[in-house]
Image (cartoon, rainbow, N blue to C red):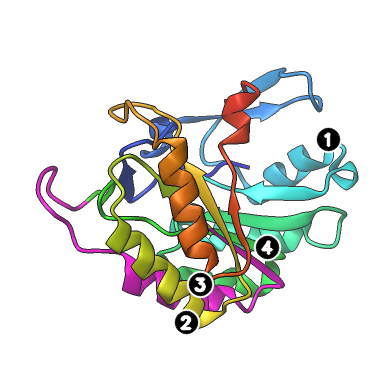
Amino acid sequence: MRLGECDLRCRWCDSPHTWQRAAECRIELRRGTGEHRVVPNPVAIPDALAACETLDLAAHRFVSLTGGEPLLQPEAVGALARGLRGRGPRILLETHGLAAEALEQVVDALDVVSMDWKLASDVRRASDPRHGPVDPFHAAHERFLRIARRAPEVVVKLVVTASSEDPEIDEAVARIAGVDRALTLVLQPVTPSGPVREAPSSERLLAIFLRLSRTLPDVRLIPQTHKRIGVP
C-alpha cells in the first residue's frame, strides 16, 4: 500500500511521482491481474481496508506500507496497521527512517520496520539547497532506530552508489552497532535511475561487505530484486 508525499530527494529514486500529493489513487481489482480502478484521493481508511480484503488478504505473508514516506501521515499508517493486524499478513513499514516522533505513534501496531540509512553524498532533504554539501542523517537515523527496536523485527537498508564515501558508510555501521549489533543490515547496490548512471563495481561492493561484516554479524548484499524481475 503506497502513501504519497516524501520530504527527501534521493538521487536514484525510481518513484519521484510519489514526492507530491496525487489527485487520484489506483486500487487493484483482483489479485495478480493488474486490473485497477481509479478513485480520487484521499481514500478513506475503511475503503482502503476493504480494498485489501478483495485481494485475498489472508493469503499474503506481508502488507507493506510504503511511499513516498508513509510516516508523513502517521494517523493513516496507524489506522491501516491496526485495521489489518491480526488478519493474516504481518504489517511491514518501509520508511526513510527519519520521522522518529511519527514512529512513536505507530510502532506498537507494526510487525516489521524496514528503515533506510541515508547517506548525504546522494540524498537531500526537500528543504535543502540543490547544490553543495548537506547535513548528515546519522543522528536522526540513530534516534529513529532506537524507537524502531520496539517492533518485533527491524531491518536497516543502506543504498550504496559509486559516490558513497567510506567514512559515511563506516559511521552508519558504527552507529547501528552501537544500538544493536544483532540487527540485519542490507547493503543494496543502486540500480541506475535518473541522474545516477553508474552502479558501484562488484569489487567495491565485496570490499564494503567484508569490512562491514567485521562490525555487524548479519550483513547481506541484496540487489533491488523487483528491478531484476521487471516489477515497477
Q: Is residue 176 above or below residue 52?
A: below
Question: Residue at 30% of width from left, 62% of height from top?
Answer: 168
Question: Would you say the residues marked 1 and 4 are in contact, meaning their CB atoms lie under 8 Å apart?
Answer: no
Q: Is residue 33 left or right of residue 16?
A: right
The Cα–Cα distance between marks 3 and 4, rounded to whole angstroms, is: 23 Å
The image's mark for residue 215 is 3
Q: Locate residue 141 relative to residue 89 in the image: left or right.
A: left
In x, y percent, where is residue 137? 31, 64
**Residue 112 numbered tag:** 4
Q: Position of residue 150 (x, y in %)?
A: 63, 79
Q: Residues within 10 Å of mark 4 (few under 14, many from 20)?
A: many
- The Cα–Cα distance between marks 3 and 1, rounded to whole angstroms, is 45 Å
Which stretch appears magenta?
127-156
Residue 12 at x, y = what percent? 37, 36
Is tag 3's residue or tag 4's residue first in the polypeptide sequence? 4
Would residue 80 be visible to someone looking at this image?
A: no
Residue 201 or residue 186, whichever sits in front: 201
Q: Is residue 133 visible?
A: yes
Mark earlier in primary sequence (1, 2): 1
Amino acid under label 3?
Thr
In which quadrant will I find the N terminus?
top right
At numbered mark 3, what does the secondary structure look like: helix, strand or loop?
loop
Rendered image quadrant of residue 218: bottom right
Cβ–Cβ under 8 Å for marks 3 and 1? no
| Residue annotated with mark 1 | 54
How far separated are the C-alphas under marks 1 and 2? 43 Å
Residue 134 in magenta stretch: yes
Q: Kindly state the secondary structure of the residue where label 2 is placed.
A: helix
Q: Secondary structure at mark 4?
A: strand
Q: Nearer the viewer, mark 1 or mark 2?
A: 2
